[in-house]
Amino acid sequence: MTSFGRVISVRGSQARVGLLATSQMPFSEVRATVGRFVSIRSASSVIVAMITEVSCEDLPTSDNYIATASVDLLGEILGGDRPKFQRGVTNYPTIGDTVDLISAQELRTIYAPSGSDQINIGTLQQDRSVTAYVDIEELLSKHFAVLGSTGVGKSTGVSLLLNEILKSRPNLRIFLLDVHNEYGRCFGERAQVLNPRNLKLPFWLFNFEEIVDVLFGGRPGVPEELDILAEVIPMAKGIYTQYQNADRIGLKRIDPKQIGYTVDTPVPYRLVDLISLIDERMGKLENRSSRIIYHKLISRIETVRNDPRYAFMFDNANVGGDTMAEVISHLFRLPANGRPMTVMQLAGFPAEVIDSVVSVLCRMAFDFGLWSDGVSPLLFVCEEAHRYASADRNIGFGPTRKAVSRIAKEGRKYGVYLGLVTQRPAELDATIISQCNTLFTMRLANDRDQALLRSAVSDAAANLLSFVPSLGTREVLAFGEGVALPTRLRFKEVPPHQLPRSEATIATVPSVAAGHDMHFVSAVLERWRGATSHRDVPNDPAISERPAARTTTLDAPMLQPSLGLDPDRFSLLKKPLR
């Protein structure tokens, strides 16, 4: 190939190239524009570089050059029978080395799958004939993040990545926090969908901070009431253990305090025991104002227990039973039974407890990995991650941030991997995002988000970030360990059945045929009220399937159109809760 430029200066990881006027290629064909790869031929290798700036200002006095270009040096292709690409530059170019546009063959050498553990996620923006592969081992074991504004194809990208990961690693367990109930149908038979109707998460699995958050509805607890709770919860656990062991202990009573449980030990207790312990203490008090504190605490516990929205926690609250093994087996797919993935749909849970529920799930995922020595790896994907791990310490629920942060910092040692998805990376805790070693960045318009990215990307190609505000839909910049080079690529098409539901079915123009009459409004109100009452809801798919085997109810994603009505009538209900 005829060279179109020469190196005219070198500095650190950058070089300047003069574009030759005498090149046999017309300048319009050269298309030496920002974002293109070039190859610089040095004595022992071919250096791969990317153009970051082209200018014809301040040209050298000679007439040899029609423009100059700044390039970032990214890596080199080492020769031999089987050319091999490696990151970093060991042999720097010298003044006068020839510069060519990179050939398709060289691009294939760079992006060639280095092993069997690669997934195909799309094509290069520079050359659509070259497939972009991601190293799945590096992607998972060092965590990853998908960043991008609303509407740029972020959810579709997540669906694509997870489906490809499932294809390549059919036995990897995946747990996806689905904030807007978009992913219920994206993974077909390979995923179980959990929502408030079919989730059982007993209240005694919540640690002290989490149960306080539930009882006080997300507000700070009253110190006097917290002191009482901290004292009686371990005793309630001791009493329950006594019941269980009564046949072995015989008539001999053991002081519950001596059993040695803490408020955070995940062992069962019954609410009836908890309330009777508080009641017993209240009965011993003569001071009326002190008794009011106990009375308030009892009524607080009763209110939450009797609220139908909290049934997933307080079902069988007074029956007991150590169901921890079943709960963890069900949540984290052990055994997977052909369904290695869980989609946890969070829209529909009471807003006050979502943080606590996410905290419990993150904490249990990490602790199970820790105590099982990472024998069965799990990928924990957190949608809208900035909601749970905010950079501002005053926002959000502390234990949730701590749980996500723990997975980010230590999870890989115990086979718990993290995938973060967010549209506001600047609002996400910087420590957590710095642990994600592969970043898929889609269009981001906000300056603060772009500034955070610049600080997070360590590659020589930080200049690539100047493309971020102008990326097209489905276009993505991939950085980090999972990709051979910082790459501008285009995600491949996702089949319609794998599209997140918000994109697959929602139209902003209401259907004229739907005819939103009073019957429609009444049907909506029935579902609305049904979510906060014990009564069965008419036309509710989850109810109609209830008499069947238990496994069938697990497949019923929340907030779907009713079975008995015209689907168009519910097009409004399909709007994601953005």
Image (cartoon, helix red, strand yellow):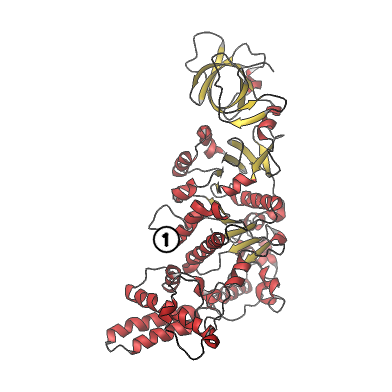
Nearest to the observer: residue 67 or residue 356: 356
Percent from the top left, x then y, of residue 497? 71, 56
Q: Position of residue 27 (x, y in %)?
A: 63, 18
Residue 534 image position (x, y, % from top left):
57, 81
- Near-viewer residue (231 or 139): 231
Q: Percent x, y for residue 95?
A: 54, 14
Q: Quadrant of residue 82?
A: top right
Residue at image position (60%, 71%) is: 325
Q: Farthest residue in the bottom direction?
A: 251
Residue that lies at the very extreme toward the top in this rendered image: 62
In front: 512, or 434? 434
Q: Is residue 351 above or below residue 43?
A: below
Q: Is residue 86 visible?
A: yes
Question: In percent of the image, x 61 and y 43: which residue is there?
Answer: 473
Classify 145 as above or below 541. Answer: above
Judging depth in this view, the residue of 178 and 246 nearest the camera is 246
Compared to residue 422, the image places residue 11 above or below, namely above
Is 342 situated left or right of 413 in this image? right
The quadrant in which the N terminus is found is top right
Q: Is residue 484 above or below residue 160?
A: above
Left or right: residue 507 versus residue 293 is right
Residue at the image point whose x is 67% and y is 40% from the top: 133
Is disc 1 surrounded by few (<14), some (14 to 19) or many (20+) residues within 10 Å? Answer: some
Q: The residue under label 1 is which amino acid type?
A: Gly
Q: Which residue is mark 1?
A: 398
Q: Secondary structure at mark 1?
A: helix
